[in-house]
Image: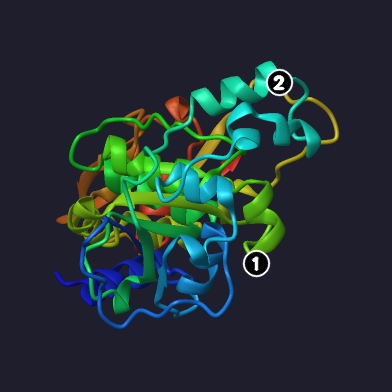
Amino acid sequence: MNNNELATALTKMLTLRWSPVAVKLVKPGEKIPEKVTQPSVPLRHCQAITLARRGNSLYMPPSRHACPDGAAIMGLVPMSPKLRSGELYLLFKKLPTIECAQKMIATRQEFEAGTYAATVLAPLEDATFEPDVVIFTMYPEQMMWLMCAASYSTGERHNFHTSGYNSTCADLTVQVMKTQQMNISFGCYGARAISDISDFEAYVSVPFQQLPTLVGALEKLSVKSIPEARRRIYMPPVIDKVAYAEPVGGNSVDVRIDSNQCTGCGLCEAFCPEAVIRMVTVDGKQTASASAAEKCCACYTCAGQCPQKAIQLTVR
C-alpha cells in the first residue's frame, strides 16, 4: 500500500479527525523530499505536527525550529548548557530539584548533535517520502483499537516509555525511531501550550514499517469487534434497573428467549461463558434454550451478540 492508501484506510477504520502525520529526520547531505516548504516563521516540533495534520507539508532545518530543546533532542543542533543541566526546568517550575531534572534528561532518548540536518513533516496521504514514524492525534477509544491491532497477530501487551516532558520530540520521534516500538504521549508543557490538541486527545507514534501490518489487523477487527463496540451492544440491558432502594441478596436472572425471533444461529450458545444456553430442536427447528439459567452471571453477552435481539435478561 502507498502512503495515500494507508492514510485512507486508517482514517476510515479508526474514524480519525486528523490526518496521521508522516515524520522524517533528514540526514546531512540527504536529498530534500519533493512538495515540502519551509514555514514562514520558526515552529516547535509539536506545533509543526499540528500544521501537518491540518494538511501542510513542511521542511524544517534548524533555523525553522523554535524550540532549542526539541531541536537538540532530535540531533539537529547541540544542546545548550542550561538545557543540558536541567536548570531551565526549575526556572519554569516544572520540576522541584536539579536532581529530578537531570534524571529526567538522562532517561529520555535523544540523538547526538549533527546526526540529522532537518525534519520533514506531512499529512501521510500527501507524503512524498518514506517516513521514519507516523504520529496520530487520537481519542482514547481510537488509541485502544490501534493497540488491539498491534497485539492482533502476537497477543503481546505493550510497555510504553513516556513522560509529560519532551513529548513529541523525545517520546514520539526519537524513542520510536530508536526502539522501533509504538509509543504514546499525553503531550507536554510546550505541546499543550502552543498547539490546538484538545484536552481529550493524546498522541500515538508508530514506526512507519509497521503500518501495513496494523492496517491488516484493523481490517479484521472492523468486521465485528469495532462496529459492535461502537454500537454499545451491551448497553440497553446493562442500564436496566441498575439501582435498588435497598441491598438485594441472592439475585437470580431470568433468561427469556423469544422463539419466534430466534433463528437458531447458535451465537448465544457459542459466546455464553457459563454454558447457560444450548441449542435444542423443537418441532424440527433449531432454537436456543436457557437450560441452565441458574448459572447465568448476567454478563449480557448473549443479548448483545444475538442478531435478532431475541434474548432478554432480567435480574431479580
First in sequence: mark 2 or mark 1? Answer: 2
Kindly tell me whether residue 86 is visible in this rendering: yes
Q: Position of residue 6 (x, y in %)?
A: 24, 69
Residues 137 and 142: in front is 137
Amino acid identity at mark 1: Asp
Q: Position of residue 35 (x, y in %)?
A: 30, 83
Q: In the picture, residue 109 is in which quadrant?
A: top left
- How many tags in the picture? 2
How dense is the environment of label 1, judged by Cα within 10 Å: few (below 14), some, or many (20 and up)? few
Q: Position of residue 107 (x, y in %)?
A: 49, 24
The residue at the far top in this view is 99
Amino acid identity at mark 2: Ile
Q: Which mark is residue 70?
A: none
Element class at badge 2 = helix
On-image quarter of the N terminus: bottom left
Q: In the picture, residue 152 is in which quadrant?
A: top left
Q: In the picture, residue 33 is in which quadrant?
A: bottom left
Kindly tell me whether residue 265 is visible in this rendering: no
Q: Which mark is residue 98?
A: 2
Residue at point 47%, 71% (across, down): 53
- The residue identified by callout 1 is 196
